[in-house]
Structures are given as structure tokens and as C-alpha cells.
Amino acid sequence: MSAVGRGGTGTAALLLACIVAACGGGGGGPGAAPDPGPADLLSADVETLDGADADARDGTLLDLPTDLPDPGDETTAGDANGDESIAADPIPGDVDPETLPLSPVDTTPPVQLPDGVSLRVATLNVYGFHFATPEEIGAWLGGQDADLAMLEEIGADTAARVATAAGFPYLFAGGGDEALLSKTPLDGPAEVPLVDGRGLIHATTVVEDVTFSVYAAHISWHVEGNLQARQIAREVMAADPLPHLVLAGDFNDEHYSTQNNYLDEVLTDAATSMGWYPGQHITWPSTGFDETEGAQTIDLVFFRKALPAIVKGLAVLNLSPVLSDHKPVVADLLYPREDLPFASDPLAAGRDPFAAFPPAGTRTPNLLVNPGAEDGLSGWDVGGGAQAAATCQQLAPRTGTALFKGFDTQPDPGVPWSWATQVVDLSSRAAPIDAGRGRLYASAWLATGYRTVEKDGEVSNLLTTYSDGEVIVETLDATGVALSRTVSGRRDTLAWHPFAAVVDVPPGARAARVTWMSHYKSQGGDADTAAVDDLYLGFEEVATAHRVLGGTLVPGGGKPGDPPALAIPAGWAAMPDGQPVGPWGITLFPPYCASGKACFIANPGVDPDTEPVVGPAALTRTVDLAPWAADVDAGRLAIRWAASLRTFSALASVHLALVVLDADGSPWATFESPPLQAAEWTRVVQLTRMPPNARKVRIEVRTPLDRADDTVFADEVSLVPERVPASE
């Protein structure tokens, strides 16, 4: 984070903390933040917090409208501009803005890993060098310090050019389109033919006196992908005698697909070990929104189930400019030195979505009625064709006899949602809530029904832009105004996968509202739909007060509404979810919001009635800190400021800024997150201590809009007051 104050500028010691909903890391290339180096990209000591789970664990609370009959109606209230005149003493001149940024995540002691053999693996489908030259890809790859690299859609001659530019001394490229690059000698290189014309390339190599069997893969999808994956799992892996193994490449489908179910018989992928749900971090496409095959995690790194590696870290890299239509994936793996698995994985517990929950069997009773649709839709207010059913295409209920799901047939194009909501009264718990000792535990299981294709008796999921689902958990005050909003992120997993969140209840909350939504995304034909089962909401009175002092200061999470929560300048506009919008041509694959029914879009030509104007534009809101004046002046108040951001291409950029205003209303200091150029929804979270006498701050979602086709998006904006230990 940079802090810009009166009389000077500088770089704070604490930089960006990017907590993602469906995102990768920082960018690379001209004008972007540098790629993380080997030591900091994949740290064994830092747990990556993802999406809404991260928001909940860190206390980031987001708002939703108060529309109980229709939980998706994105209306807001409040003055977006604010009165910037401040009746207070000036901020002291001896306060250094550089001392105010705080870490937005709680630090944990480093995990002690067992002794083992470390292996860094990179994989990238280079897309036939349509986006970058072999030398450009090699230059990037050379900076990753990988031990092995698996490349796809590449020829032997161009692979040699990449290897030279990257500094890899050993290379094997078969007659197909895969290449294997290595720092250590490759022994017995060979091609492994698969059915329907695909293949693997294979070699062995010795790392730290341990012999590894290494494979590069690029397989098909649908029935052909099923057959190839089955052959890999049941023939190739079964015939390989080496327990130390890594298989990486482009698998053209992701975890829970019918083809990856074959691979999962004997292999485990690093993304699953990290606790990611499929699609949480997108490896294809590298720009734009969901294409014909959806937004996918299809570039994978596998190892044997019988001898699993500890995944020290995994990164899907959002580069700018992009190198390919795929994003690179880099994994840091730790293998046992011997042929016996590690006794345990010390990182696994922290990646469990239920890690912050009380142990199973000790959790408080479920406050939701009919949480699994066994009583139909009883207890839920529903809309958009939401229903209770015995099945959802291939899905059976996770437990019990029923599940919730969206519509069966394609809805009106303007209303591509199903939803259900339930409000739980918390007024009997007012005392602990107002003392800052109320905590909610929320969870659900989500999945998407899918269509299938069949050939010669083999049935595969039909790879498409699957409809997705989400769960939204809000706290409400006594009048029904939402104080906080925690979201699961939109998910389209092909089997049941959990969402879990811990919500520190802001003082003044008197109810909780749980909503599930199914978003239609199918490209023609019969609609698939998202499903949800086994919803849970529990309340606990904790012994020690949490840090959250109030609800978000951005009504509605910044959702578009009337009146708007954010001031909307030229260049920005409200955007309905899932609709073809704008004159710049986003029509075939419409843009999707991070959550709910609407979000914001910026583009120089966003207003079709005016000439496009290239230049900076910012969504803004000024908020009052007077209710926490005592904490501000004692150095105990911090503002957690956050938003979900993304770009359409990787060349555009967007970032957050927090402007602290002085007594006369002028900017005293501006804190900025680094530019985000990721073409996927990315949760950006910052935490900043307020200086004495600060009474107002302004949040800004900034974009330079340097080019006529620059397009960026913003959603789920929040400003949450927190009490932190006083500064020394």
C-alpha cells in the first residue's frame, strides 16, 4: 500500500493484501506490479485467505439492501457524496502516514514442515505463441526459478527457444504438442500414446538423490477426455513403478468433472490440496468473462495419492500483458525423501473451510428452519423459480431426501436468477451482540447440475458455461437495514463443495438473513442450474469482544441503487448481472457480477449518448467517523476498506484508495492499493489506522481508463470500523 501525505510520498512497509473471491496473484509485465519471486510467491508460512471465507475471518462485513421480499433487489440509501466540512482540530503534524497501514490478516506462527525434497513446478499452455513469442515466455519462465516446467501447444523448435531464453539446460519435446523442461537431467524420455490421438511425454529425473517420474499432459474433454483420463489413471500410473511422481499440464476440465474423477482414483491435484473449489482461481480464459467452456481451473499439477506431496503454495498468475489464453500455474511441493508418505500435512488443517468453526459435535443449534428442503420451501421466501426437488440433473441430495435448486427452464433474459431467503431473529441475543461478543457460523454445500454427452456407453459432463450458485449471509438492525454482508462467491462446482464463514456480528444487529441464489449462465439449450443443501447458521456468545465496532459505512455494499451509495462519475455506470451491455462489444459472453444482481462497470464509452472520454474516473463515498471519535483520538480505530475488483482485459487496471480528510475537508493522506490488472474477480482488502482528529474518510474505486477499450468492474465495496490495539 502506498501512503501519500502532505509534504511527501513514500511506500509503506505493509503492501497490498489481496484476498480473492475468485482470483490469482499479482500481475507482471510493463506497468504492472512485479511478479512475486520464488521466496515470497509460495510461502509455507503464510496462509492464503480466499473469498468470503477470508472476509469473514478478518471481519470484513459487507452490506445488502433491506428488501426482505426480494433479497436480490439492489437498492441502497444514503448520501454518496457526503459533506466534507469537518468541525474538529487538525490532524497533528507529527503523525507519519507511513505508520498507519496495518496488516489486514492476522499473522500466525510459521508452520514447521517435515524434512523433504522441494520441487517447484510450472505449467503453461502457450497457445501456439499467438500472444507472446517463445523468447518472451522464456524470459517470464526464467524468473520463476522452477525445477520443472510443462508446456503445451508448443513444437520442438519453439520449445528449444523457450528453454534457451528461460535458462533450462534439459528439454524433451515429443511429436505432439507438449514439452518438458528441467534443471536436472531427463532420463529415458518417451512419448506415451493415449486414445483418440492425444499423448503424454514422460521422463525421469533425480532431485536431491530422489528419482522422480515426471509427465507433461494435454488431454481432451467430453468422452475423449474421459477415456484418456481413465487410461492415465488405470494403465499409465499403474504401470509406473516410481512413487515420487508429478503430472502437470492442461487437462481441459477440472476437479469433480467426470474425466478428473478417473484421475482422482489414484492422483491428487495441488489445487484441491489447497482447499480451492474449482473455478475459485481461473486458469482459462486469461482475459474476458466465461467463454464456451466456462471459467475453469484446468491447468493442474498432480501427484500420487499413495505418496502425496505437501503443497507449500500454489499460484495462478494474472500477468499483464498476458502470455497466452491460459494463465501460468506455479506450485511449490514438498515430497517425502523415502517411499513412505508423511505422517501428516501440517498445512491441511488451516485450509479446511471449517477450520475456524467449533469442532463437529460442539456447534450451536441450527437457527434455520428447513435447511435441506425436506419440508419443501417451508420457512423460505422464494422467487425466480426457486424450488425444492429430489434431484438436480445428476445431483442427488447431499443428505436427506431433497435439495434446493433454481429454475428448470430458461427464465426471462432480464431475470436470470432464482433465490430464496430466510430471516432469523437475534433480538434475544442483543446484550452480547452490542458488547461485541456475538458471532455467527454460517455454512452450506453448493453444486451445479450439468448436462451430459454419451458415446459408446461412456457418459461425460457437457463442458459449458455452467450456471452457478452463491450464499449470502447478512446481519440486520432492528429496522431491517443491513449492517453486514458476507458472500460465498459464485460457484459452479460439479459436485457438492462446502462454503463456511465466521461472521463477527456488528453491534446493533437484531437479525440475520441467509439467501441462496442460482444464476443462469447456460449458452443455449436446456438450462443447467445451481443447487444448495444443508444450510447452517449458528450463533455463539464469545468470551472476548471482537474488533468490529459497527456495520459497513457503504450502504448496500456499494450496489447500484437509488439513491446511490457511491457517487458515480462519467466513465462509470451501474451494470445488471449477466446482461449484454455497453457499446464496446461485450455481448457474446456477458459480464457477471461478483455477487447479487448488479455491480459497477467503467469504460470510456459507458454512456452511449456521449462521446467516449479517456481519462481517470473514480467511484467515491465520504463517511463520518464522529461516532468513534474517542477511539480515533486514542489511536484505536482502524478502517477495513475493501472491494471486489476485476478487469475485462489484463491491460486495464483498477485499484482502491482511502483518503483521510483533515479538519478543513482537504485530503490529509491518501492510501492506495497497487493496481489490479486481473481479468477475474479479486477481493482487495486493506486495513488502516486512523490518525488523531480524523473525522471523515473517502473511499475511491479508481481506474485510469487509459485506452478507449479499457473496461473494469467493481462490486461489494465496504468500509468497516474496527477497534485495534492503540499505537505505541
Image (cartoon, rainbow, N blue to C red):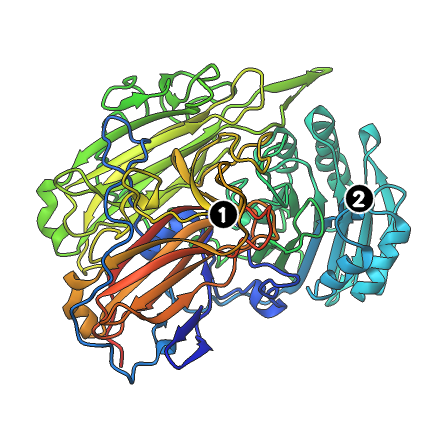
Residue 570: give its label: none
> Which type of secondary structure does the marked residue at label 2 adopt?
loop
| Residue at 60% over, 27% down | 464
Residue 439 picture location, percent across and down = 22, 49
- Report the Cα–Cα distance between label 1 and label 2: 29 Å
> Looking at the image, which is closer to me, 582 or 257?
582
**Badge 1 is on which residue?**
275
Q: Nearer the viewer, mark 1 or mark 2?
A: 2
Residue 539 picture location, percent across and down = 21, 44
- Left or right: residue 569 versus residue 244 is left
Q: Which quarter of the figure is the N terminus placed in?
A: bottom left
| Residue at 18% over, 75% down | 634
Q: Amino acid at mark 1?
A: Gly
| Residue at 21% over, 32% down | 423
Say if 669 sits above or below 27 in the image.
below
Tell me if I can see residue 701 in this picture.
yes
Q: Which quarter of the picture shows residue 477?
A: top left
Tell me if I can see residue 352 in this picture.
no
Q: Amino acid at mark 2?
A: Glu
**Badge 2 is on which residue?**
153
Which of the two labelled residues, at mark 1 and mark 2, occupies the earlier sequence position? 2
| Residue at 14% over, 49% down | 508
